[in-house]
Image (cartoon, rainbow, N blue to C red):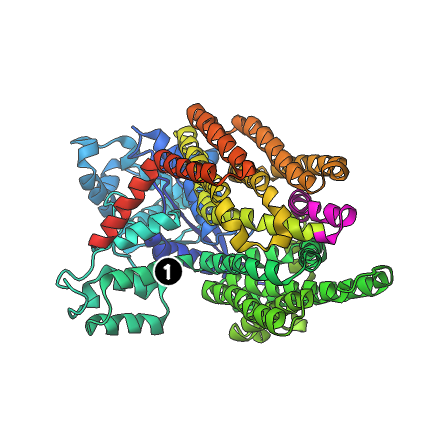
Amino acid sequence: MESKKRVLTGDRPTGKLHIGHYFGSLKKRVEMQNSGEYDLYILIADVQALTDNFNNPDKVRANVRQVALDYLSIGIDPEKTTIYIQSMIPETAELTVFYSNLVTIARLQRNPTVKTEIAQKKELFGESVTYGFLGYPVSQAADITCFDGELVPVGEDQLPLIEQCREIVRKFNSIYGETLKEPEAVLSKGKRIKGLDGNEKMGKSLGNAIYLSDSEEEVNKKVMSAVTDPNRIKKDDLGNPDICMVAYYHKLFTKDEDYKTVCSECKAGERGCVACKKQLIKNTAIVSLGKICTQLITFLLLPLYTYILSTEEYGVVDLLNTLVSLFMPVVTLQIEQGVFRYLLDSRGNKENEKSIISNTVIFTIFQTIIYSFVFIIASNWIHNDYKYFLAVNLVATMFSNIFLQISRGLGDNTKYAIGSFLSGAVSVILNVLFIVVFKWGAYGILSATLIGNITCASYIFFSKKLGEYISFKKKDHQILKQMLKYSVPLVPNMLSWWIVNASDRMIISTILGIAQNGIYSAANKFSGVVSTLYSVFNLTWTESAALNIESEDRDNFFSEIFGFTIRFFGTVCIGIIAVMPFVFNILINEKFGEAYYQIPILMIATMFNILVSFLGSIYVAKKLTKEIAKTSIFAAIINLVVNISLVNFIGLYAASISTAVSYFAMFVYRIIDSRKYVKLSVPKKLVFSFIIVTAITVITYYVRNTALSVITLIMVVIYALLINKNSMQYIMKAVNKKMKK
């Protein structure tokens, strides 16, 4: 068997990596990794970075982790590629000392690359360059030869450095015998990416870069500031996409046919610059859109459900959906998470993609067969008219989720969003038809959900041509074992969260009856809106938390975002409580009237849930998944104990109170425990004022006096504006800036 060529490459950790790095070299590294033809070593050259950052070692230290995270984000897999930090390999320092005896100062001074870089750094070095910087080609030679690097991808300007390394190798071998491998330079074909300002080079020092670690908000802001055709003043002016940076980036990120449309409409004066920027931004946010639309559709159906369905029917629907969420991780073993993760690593490698998808589908079919046999046997003891809907909906949901994750893993977020939206849209249309026209009741909702899932799965299957990826000949136990090794540990955590978030439905249905569960479910829909809103924010926050967990100002950064979370989402929760006396009877039918009294407790529970999730991002950033599971299990136990103890005495209140208590307990646990990693500064005045306003709002809510409710609503609005003043000012400035552009 022919041995793989060893490739050595890397980066200096002097700042975040940007899309210029991606198209210049990172993309090629991923392709080489996934091809299976190379033995890839990637160096984070922190020692070399000190040669011109000796006066700022903290900068280098902070960016080591940042660069590593950037590698992982673009698909570099530590199981396939060796990533190492230069300072952690002392042997390279030893080799540098030995090699330095083989190189003269005069030879180093003649190196064209070194000469150019010294001239560029005259402000740093003055008239006298340091020994370390002058001699860094020697250190680089040690890095390459220490790991027997055979191929070294470089830009044209770095060829003299590789030639210097080759000279050192030849001289060493001539003295000590054939010991070292002589590396070959591989000229990188990666393109140089222009900056947002039109500069031929994108760079940190130029302030014109889009970083791999930028949040969606940061990307949006930068894209909206990108230089466009200076001769275009109005939308209908004829444009020149060749001198427009937005068109330039469209060429990189947009499909060929869409890029051609962008250019033709620009030239014809049919597309304005702002519209063009917005389309580019849209390509980065499409996953979130699909998620929000699905959740919004569910909420908008609430009045229809509560006015037409009985409390028993609505309770049945909610209970069955709860059971699906319980059984799903058990039946699938979270394989959908595994297929997404492993497809990310194999993008561009058609054979690997086929193998991963084939084994996922084969496993899912196998699990479906086992599940079907278990259900058939167990159905004799299940006395429920809707049990077959439960069985079929679980299978449909399972395949829908897996196909959606496959679409994401293959890099087609557009189809992911369309599939998610189709599922919700079809459900809405059929709900109206089945419930209003055909009067099918709970059967109508369940049928609509089933068809929605089937529509989603079918759309993804045919639009992505998944049939071309699936082959039973591709059965590979090793790949499946790797995916399950990744996904199975996620099952216990999912089940713990199910206990906290959904077990109260089971307890209510069993002890109080299915009708009471319908009422409780209706009350929960309002807190679900806030949770969905936070989940969108959390997509960006989780990433930012991971990137800043080791930074020097970590505590201040986390404390600032923590304060924002309390102010914004806290006032949203209070606002819903304050406005509910005026809209409840419009949104909810009177037969669900008891739900009114559960809403404030559930909104408070939601606020603590949001804070718990925020603190959980600290554990995620530190990769402390066991701590996440520990706190989840802790909350689950409290929820069960409180719920079961009180349900016979206070009815529905037991469910809402147990939810609030468990989230509060988890919040206290995490805010104390997380101080080991991040010292959050809790704004005491804000917390005190928040408690006072919440107390007044809740008391007024239960008093049910119209005049008091109006006064309270006005108070809450003023309070929300005051404590979110800075955030509002920032948003208004951003809006005005975009409007001017």
Q: What residue is rendered at 40% in x and 29% in y?
A: 556
* Image location (x, y in percent) of residue 123: 18, 34
Q: Position of residue 150 (x, y in %)?
A: 44, 53
Q: Which residues are magenta?
A: 491-515
Q: How packed is label 1: few (under 14 Cα within 10 Å), some, or many (20 or more)?
A: some
The answer to whether 370 appears left or right of 677 in the picture is right
Q: Quadrant of the N terminus?
A: bottom right
Residue 175 vs residue 486, the one in the foreground: 486
Residue at image location 41% in from the left, 43% down from the top: 67
Tag 1's secondary structure?
helix
Total marks shown come to: 1
Name the residue beneath numbered marker 1: 282
Q: Is residue 388 left or right of residue 429?
A: right
Residue nearest the observer in this picture, 290 or 144: 290
Who's the residue at 61% across and 52% down the image?
Answer: 522
* 705 in relation to 34, above or below: above
Q: Is residue 507 above or below residue 313?
A: above
Foreground pick, 413 / 645 = 645
* Res 199 seen here: no
- What is the three-letter code of the residue carrying label 1? Lys
Name the side, left or right, on which 420 lies relative to 14. Answer: right
Question: Where residue 504 appears, x then y in whole percent?
Answer: 70, 45
The quadrant holding residue 722 is top left
Q: Is residue 41 visible?
A: yes
Q: Is residue 513 above or below residue 399?
A: above
In magenta segment, residue 66: no
**Residue at figure coordinates x 37%, y 60% from the top left:** 282
In depth, the one of 6 and 490 nearer the eye is 490
Q: Left of 711 or right of it: where is 403?
A: right
Verify whether residue 509 appears in magenta.
yes
Quarter of the image with the C terminus in it: bottom left
Q: Which secondary structure is most common in the magenta stretch?
A: helix
